[in-house]
Image (cartoon, grey):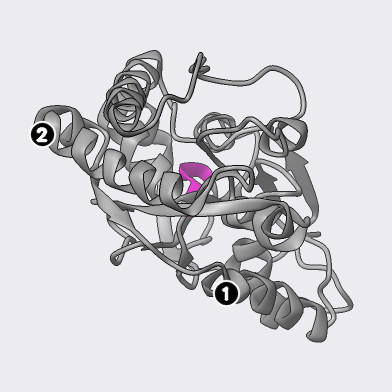
Amino acid sequence: MYNVTPHHAALWHALLSDCVAVFARAFEPGDVTIVNAPEGELMPHWRRKDLLLSQTCGYPYRMLGLADEVQLIATPIFDAPGCEGPRYRSVLVVSAEAWARGANTLEACRGLRAACNGTDSHSGMNAFRHSVAPLARGGRFFASVFWTGSHAATLRALASGAADVGAIDCVTLALLNDSHPEWFGGVRTIGMTHSAPGLPLIASRALGEGQAEALRDALDTALAADPERARTLRLRGFARLTGEAYAEIEDMANAATQQGYPELR
């Protein structure tokens, strides 16, 4: 989920290759194919019975039924502003033009154009909605919502002035700032959302408990094998949370609904 550039994708590929190699010393998983970005819809990919390891967003994990179909392996711990252990936040970002017009708080963004990566995103939609809900009137806050397809596209929309405000995963934002600092001249940050557990690493429930533990250990070993790779990925470790930790994401969705703001609008 954090393949924000081809370079980051290559580093993740290498880390996963090292992980599989360590895992294979204890188990013989057979042929393992590592893909950087599965083609098509992601839900069928995450539900594959032969899935050894993948990463999903906490929203589909908790809200779209994945928790009942997959096994939680680990939650990455990142070194980025907004992260606290395995928890992360979304950064509230406005265009420089909106900032110049006085949009330096979320409340001041009333009636502006929002950008969001997708309806199934916790960081781009659910956490954003949760922050906006107390400010909405009659179930509405923004003039319009533009669905961009990715956090990087949201940032570009803000930088170009095509949108005024959005919420971007703080890890993604940090990685993009590392790789594309030139994109940030046209945006300003105005705050952060509440924190939530980070994006979980998952596997098929066909994986035995002993294999799952070995996979967790293999992730730790692969991370330690290349400190420079870990630094570039801003990856500090892997926490072993329970699935129930992700109930916070549902609580945030319910809180927005209870305040009369069930949709980002």
Q: Does the magenta stretch include residue 176?
A: no
Considering depth in this image, is 24 or 162 the residue closer to the camera?
A: 24
Is residue 120 visible in the rendered structure shown here?
Answer: yes
**What residue do we see at 49% from left, 69% from top?**
242
The numbered disc on residue 227 is: 2
User: Could you say where residue 93 lies in the image, as x and y percent from the top left?
Assistant: 48, 52
Viewer-closest of 209 and 169: 209
Image quarter where the C terminus lies is bottom right
Q: What is the span of residues highlighted in magenta in the rendered image?
A: 92-97
* Residue 54 on image: x %, y %: 53, 36
Q: Is residue 109 above or below residue 138?
A: above
Q: In terms of image quadrants, where is residue 39?
A: top right
Residue type of the residue flagged with mark 1: Glu
* Residue at (47% x, 65% y) in the render: 197
Q: Residue furthest right?
A: 138
Sequence-wise first label, 1 or 2: 2
